[in-house]
Amino acid sequence: MGWQLDKDRPIYLQIVERIRSRIAAGEYPPGAKLDSVRDLAAEAAVNPNTMQRALSELEQMGLLRTERTSGRYVTEDEALIAAVRRDLAREKIDEFVKNMSVLGYGRRDIVTLVKEFVEGEKNNG
């Protein structure tokens, strides 16, 4: 079964986002070897050319590197990975704040709700 991809946005960008998130989350740890383009394309149920384009984009970002004879590897630059992780977190927070604002919550209300939620999670889990 392929990855869940939205047909309204460029597929290669969605692949970039997914792999970037996996790197940031540690699913693809620093220095890890990625599967071949064909294997990744088969997993995602996309054309290998689309996967190649996405991987090339990730190389330009510095998140992947290619070794001619042995394939693609995740960068070992942990500072870069941490920066990507922070950027992704900021994007999620921005989206959350906008959604809460639509519901009529101000910034202080949002902070209070998040604190209450986190405290509730500590007590329940």
Image (cartoon, helix red, strand yellow):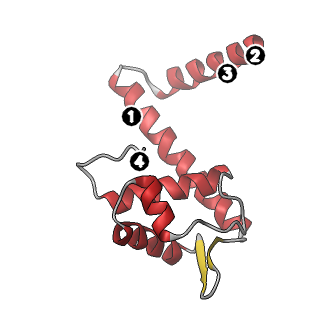
Dot in front, 3 or 4:
4
Label 3, label 4: how far apart the Cα atoms are: 34 Å
In front here: 114 or 66? Answer: 66
Q: Label 3 amino acid?
A: Val
Q: Earlier in the sequence, mark 2 or mark 4?
A: 4
Dot in front, 1 or 3:
3
Q: Which residue is mark 4?
A: 2
For the point 32% across and 57% down, which residue is it?
11
User: Is residue 18 positioned above or below 117 on the image?
Assistant: below
Label 4, label 1: how far apart the Cα atoms are: 31 Å
User: Is residue 124 positioned above or below 99 on the image?
Assistant: above
Q: Earlier in the sequence, mark 4 or mark 1?
A: 4
Apparent side of residue 37 relative to residue 25 in the rendered image (left or right):
left
Apparent side of residue 52 relative to residue 83 in the rendered image (left or right):
left
User: Is residue 107 positioned above or below 77 on the image?
Assistant: above
Position in image of residue 43 (x %, y %): 47, 54
Apparent side of residue 14 relative to residue 89 in the rendered image (left or right):
left
Secondary element at image label 3: helix
Q: Label 4 amino acid?
A: Gly
Q: Label 1 amino acid?
A: Lys
> Within 10 Å of the Cα at label 1, are there few (<14), some (14-19), or many (20+) other Cα atoms?
some
The quadrant in which the N terminus is found is top left
Q: Disc number at residue 98?
A: 1
